Amino acid sequence: MANVVIVGAQWGDEGKGKVVDIYTEYANAVVRYQGGNNAGHTLVVGNEKTVLHLIPSGILHAGKRCVIGNGVVLDPKVFLEEIVKLKARGYMKDDSQLVVDGNIHVIMPYHKAIDIARESSKTERKIGTTGRGIGPTYEDKIGRRGIRLRDLVKPETFAAKVREILPEKNFLLEKFLGQPPLDEAAIIAEYTVYARELEKYLGCSSAILNDAIEQKQNILFEGAQGSLLDVDHGTYPYVTSSSTMAGGACTGTGVGPRFINAVIGISKAYCTRVGEGPFPTELNDAMGEELRRVGNEFGATTGRPRRTGWFDAVALREAVRGNGMTGLAITKLDVLNDLEEIKVCTSYAYRGTELSEFPRDPEVLAECVPVYTSFPGWKGDISEIKSYEALPQSARDYLDKLVELTGCPVVLVSVGPRRDQTIQLANPFC
């Protein structure tokens, strides 16, 4: 038995969906434990591309139990649309394959309206949210005024909560944000329809997963976003609103930390970031454009172009430490195929001093200048290589240096988007 947590080791978009898809083969259950539909996991099976926003990537495997834990916030419309699309392509033939925790908080129309209005009203220090209502939903969760899925499926309870909450939200929308108020009856009617479809998926993630652990089954915990976007440990305030690090797998599902056996961090062979916030290795030049073009660096959820830069070993060391990572999966190594020179940030220069530790203060981080070590590129296509030993020597040297700089072994290397374009050096489930 093994229980493995997958986390993003950078600022998100690292290719977690593909890695989860690969490891699902060895798991009995796959669990999403935080975030909402602001995340998008892209999977390529054969020549077929699938983008999932809420449902665990394991859903593409028949017979695997998929669970959405209590730490997630759920947009019912997006969730149900995702199910319709999956079923149209032959997936999810059995509804019991998917379970959604009743304690999940529901994203309401006022959450999205407030999110969009706040971001559009700012003239300075935009956070760069997706406008999906994620942050305001987590605000209501922590403020103890949220609506949970178990409330939504009880018509009288749901209607009473909307009537209690909406006046305050409309006041904020109208009087402070200058937006039109939302209609109470329309919200209740729309979400009551969703409730009828959602009810069959309700369950308790803690009970299901702990029962699976007792039966010595393998569980794969699927994170969203990246470690440097964690609300506590990331580049605050330019972060998401949930715990993206490995500890979130426990609070977001009701599984105790003593049952976690491995933490695999997913990292690109270079670096990207979406939204605002400091990004020391960012390349605002032709090389940055080239990485964006070759890597197809556009958001799976928003379509926004991602900011691109060289690999940042300082930031990665911070993620390794905070998550207790036991292994690294390096993705998109093939994007570097045609480069003469590849750079890695090994430390920062800040006001005349050299920093080897990642600064927690975003104002300090914004002033940091990367100190690089350069490596020769391999100038060749590695996308069909099947073993680590068959990689060009310069590619192996590059990967070995990443291990040395981060203190974490590489357990998987992705050399293309397909499932079979993957080199596994070690299996956390074995």
Image (cartoon, helix red, strand yellow):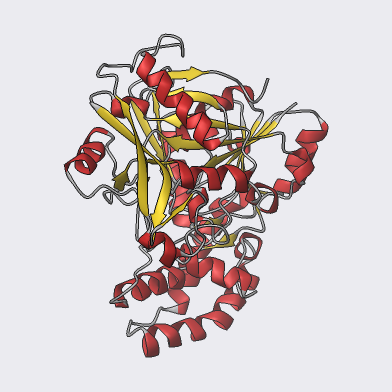
Task: Where is residue 143? Give x, y as percent.
Answer: 62, 75
Task: Where is residue 88? Give x, y as percent.
Answer: 40, 34
Q: Can residue 91 be seen at all in this image of the molecule?
A: no
The residue sitting at the right extreme is: 214
The residue sitting at the bottom extreme is: 175
Horizontal side of 384 relative to 214 (left or right) equals: left
Task: Where is residue 55? Give x, y as percent.
Answer: 51, 43
User: Who is closer to the viewer here, 15 or 378?
Assistant: 378
The vertical placement of 401 against 270, above or below, is: above
Task: Where is residue 318? Give x, y as percent.
Answer: 54, 48
Query: Which quadrant of the structure image shows residue 116?
Result: bottom left
Horizontal side of 193 relative to 146 (left or right) equals: left
The residue sitting at the left extreme is: 286
The residue sitting at the front extreme is: 352
User: Who is closer to the viewer here, 395 or 20?
Assistant: 395
Q: Residue at x 63, y 51 (%)?
A: 248
- Image quarter in which the C terminus is found: top right
User: Who is closer to the viewer here, 116 or 320?
Assistant: 320
Q: Residue at x 29, y 41 (%)?
A: 297
The vertical placement of 142 against 350, above or below, is: below
User: Who is closer to the viewer here, 84 or 178?
Assistant: 178
